Image (cartoon, grey):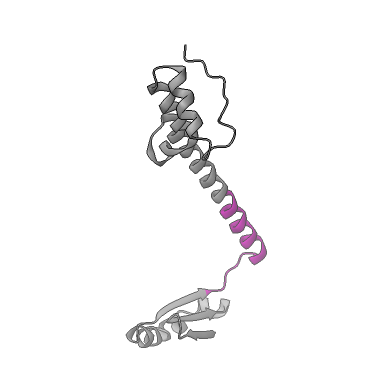
Amino acid sequence: MCMEAKKHSKVVELWLTRDETNDQQFLESLKPLYRQYQAQNYMVAVFYSGEEDLYQQTRDLLLYNRRRAAEKEVQQQRQQAMVLKNGGGSAAASPVNVWNYFVGHFEGRHDLLKWNHGMDGLYSGSKERNISLT
């Protein structure tokens, strides 16, 4: 058995060999040690030696986490696209949504171009646009 007590994180790690993992009497003998450290507000973590290939298991775990992270990113992008499409949420202040909002609320081309001219400081290239309100 290998034991590491980490004072800064208040964690005690116990690393057991395969023989220790299979010995019930040895496992019972650890209970007083658990209580001792728990009384001092330490978390006791016990690591049991396994039968699997560590390299393969670690590789599979990393691949799973990478795939899950990519799925979450795609999910977030889809949600953001839905917000932009529906014109709601915090995306309502984006240049495209602001533009669409004002195009729908101005009565004539002159008013729209006057508003557009005032936006030059914010959005480059917006001074001259060919906009049809029909």
Q: Nearer the viewer, residue 22 or 78?
A: 78
Q: Report the span colored magenta.
A: 48-67
Q: Is residue 55 above or below residue 99?
A: below
Above-or-below relation of 120 to 34: above
Residue positioned 59% across, 53% down in the render: 66
Residue at the outermost right position? 55
Report x, y in % for residue 16. Answer: 53, 79
- The answer to which image quadrant residue 10 occupies is bottom left
* Picture layout, residue 105 above or below residue 5: above
Does 52 sit left or right of 108 as displayed? right
Could you tell me which residue is drawn at 43 percent across and 35 percent down? 83
Q: Residue furthest top?
A: 134
x and y percentages locating residue 2 in the rendered image? 55, 85
106 sits to left or right of 60: left
Q: Is residue 50 magenta?
A: yes
Does the magenta stretch mainly form a helix, a strand or a loop?
A: helix
Query: Where residue 42 appears, x then y in whole percent?
Result: 39, 82
Comparing 85 with 75, the one in front is: 85
Q: How many marks?
A: 0
Q: Quadrant of the N terminus?
A: bottom right
Q: Measured from the top left, where is residue 90 in percent x and y?
A: 40, 41
Residues 105 and 20: in front is 105
Give the side of residue 51 with respect to residue 23, left or right.
right
Q: Does the segment drawn in magenta span residue 6?
A: no
| Up-down relation of residue 67 to residue 37 (above or below) | above
Q: Is residue 132 left or right of residue 106?
A: right
